[in-house]
């Protein structure tokens, strides 16, 4: 067993068994910290996109959010499949996909690929597999490596007429530059966005009265919160190490990739660190109230909890660094958070 010694002398175990069995597999010939290579989207990526659409439509409906005739902005859209498929399979009338990065420009970006070809491929997959409705059973076997537990119900799909979509190379802090107002925002990338108050202020400026925002959010403090690019092989290491200790840990135990690992930890993830409670408070400060919140526990939860017992003073260390973060966030997988702007 390898160990990392904190500044106060306490030792933390360092072992790949704390991390590798939990991560989903990567493309052949790549390391877990490498982004996907260029090329067509694979079946796992295809199923992941469909799950996003399925959960988005189903959960919004369960919270009483009507999509008919609404204008959608997908913040951090990546390849734009989410807004383009929402136009295909819901009552959304117009959509904008906003992202400051193009394919391959950021660690978390999609690999370079043909977006129109990917859209047609996904539509063909949907038509052949599911016909006229979203049915989880029709594609569930492709989600074997996805750590999800929120299972959406069947969602019928009505035929849609031609609708308007555009991509805008705009970041979350510059929504006002789109020159449009929106009824619905979707954001699956807020854990990568710094300055949450600034992001909320920008979104508020681009929001219609009564607009809704749906955050699909993996909190920093969850087990895989730093994503694969900055994850430690210390159980919950990102919540047990100070900023200075994380830098030292990367240099001691991941020397071959310490620089990009440290860069992602501080520039690829939201910094300063925000909790879900911080999000709700910041949202409220900008006039957004909670409509609904669902915590999706990860499927690996039973595997990782015993690791706590191997860390000397786990809870004392965590509370000393992040006293406002509770157990529910540490043990979470994905949060689904829906907020509404005051009318």
Image: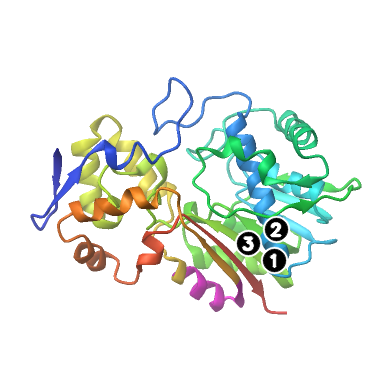
Residue 284 on the magenta span: yes
Name the residue rendered at 43%, 30% in the picture: 34
**x and y, in percent, of residue 84 in the image:** 75, 44
Residue 119 on the magenta span: no
Apparent side of residue 163 relative to residue 150 in the rendered image (left or right): right
**x and y, in percent, of residue 130 in the image:** 77, 40
Name the residue rendered at 64%, 35% in the picture: 46
**x and y, in percent, of residue 313 in the image:** 16, 61
Query: Which residue bears the numbered disc 1?
Result: 62
Point out the tag, 2 or 3, that comes first from the N-terminus: 2
Query: Which residue bears the numbered disc 3?
Result: 214
Q: Quadrant of residue 116?
A: top right
Q: Distance between the residues labelled 3 and 1?
A: 13 Å
**x and y, in percent, of residue 57 in the image:** 72, 56
Residue 18 versus residue 319 in the image, above or below: above
Is residue 75 in view from this perspective? yes
Is mark 2 in CB contact (under 8 Å) with mark 1? yes
Q: How far apart are marks 2 and 3 (CA)?
A: 12 Å
Apparent side of residue 314 relative to residue 67 in the rendered image (left or right): left
Mark 2 or 3: the one toward you: 2
Name the residue rendered at 37%, 58% in the picture: 221
Q: Mark 2, residues whose alpha carbon is within 10 Å: few (<14), some, or many (≥20)?
A: some
Residue 56 versus residue 229 in the image, above or below: below
Magenta stretch in the rendered image:
278-291
Name the residue rendered at 31%, 37% in the picture: 259
Point out the tag, 3 or 1, that comes first from the N-terminus: 1
């Amino acid at each position: 067993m390898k160990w990392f010694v904190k500044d106060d002398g306490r030792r933390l175990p360092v072992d790949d068994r704390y991390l590798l069995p939990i991560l989903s597999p990567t493309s052949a010939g790549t390391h877990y910290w490498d982004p996907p290579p260029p090329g067509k989207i694979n079946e796992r990526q295809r199923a992941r996109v469909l799950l996003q659409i399925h959960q988005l439509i189903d959960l919004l409906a369960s919270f009483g959010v009507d999509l008919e005739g609404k204008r959608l902005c997908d913040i951090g859209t990546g390849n734009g499949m989410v807004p383009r498929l929402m136009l295909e399979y819901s009552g959304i009338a117009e959509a904008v996909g906003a992202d400051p990065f193009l394919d391959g420009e950021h660690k978390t970006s999609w690999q370079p690929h043909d977006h129109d070809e990917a859209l047609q491929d996904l539509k063909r997959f949907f038509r052949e597999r599911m016909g006229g409705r979203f049915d989880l059973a029709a594609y569930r076997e492709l989600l074997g490596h996805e750590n999800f537990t929120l299972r959406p119900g069947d969602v019928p799909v009505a035929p849609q007429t031609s609708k308007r979509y555009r991509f805008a190379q705009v970041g979350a802090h510059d929504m006002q530059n789109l020159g449009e107002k929106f009824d619905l925002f979707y954001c699956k990338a807020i854990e990568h966005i710094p300055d949450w108050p600034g992001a909320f202020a920008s979104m508020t400026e681009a929001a219609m009265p009564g607009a809704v925002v749906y955050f699909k959010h993996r909190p920093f403090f969850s087990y895989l919160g730093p994503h694969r690019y900055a994850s430690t092989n210390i159980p919950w290491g990102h919540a047990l190490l100070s900023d200075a200790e994380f830098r030292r840990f990367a240099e001691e135990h991941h020397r071959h990739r310490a620089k990009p690992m440290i860069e992602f930890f501080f520039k690829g993830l939201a910094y300063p660190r925000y909790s879900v409670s911080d999000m709700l408070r910041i949202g409220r400060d900008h006039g957004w109230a909670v409509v609904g919140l669902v915590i999706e526990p990860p499927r690996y939860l039973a595997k990782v909890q015993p690791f706590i017992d191997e860390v000397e003073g786990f809870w004392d260390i965590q509370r000393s660094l992040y006293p406002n973060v509770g157990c529910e966030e540490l043990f979470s997988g994905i949060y689904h958070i829906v907020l509404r702007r005051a009318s």
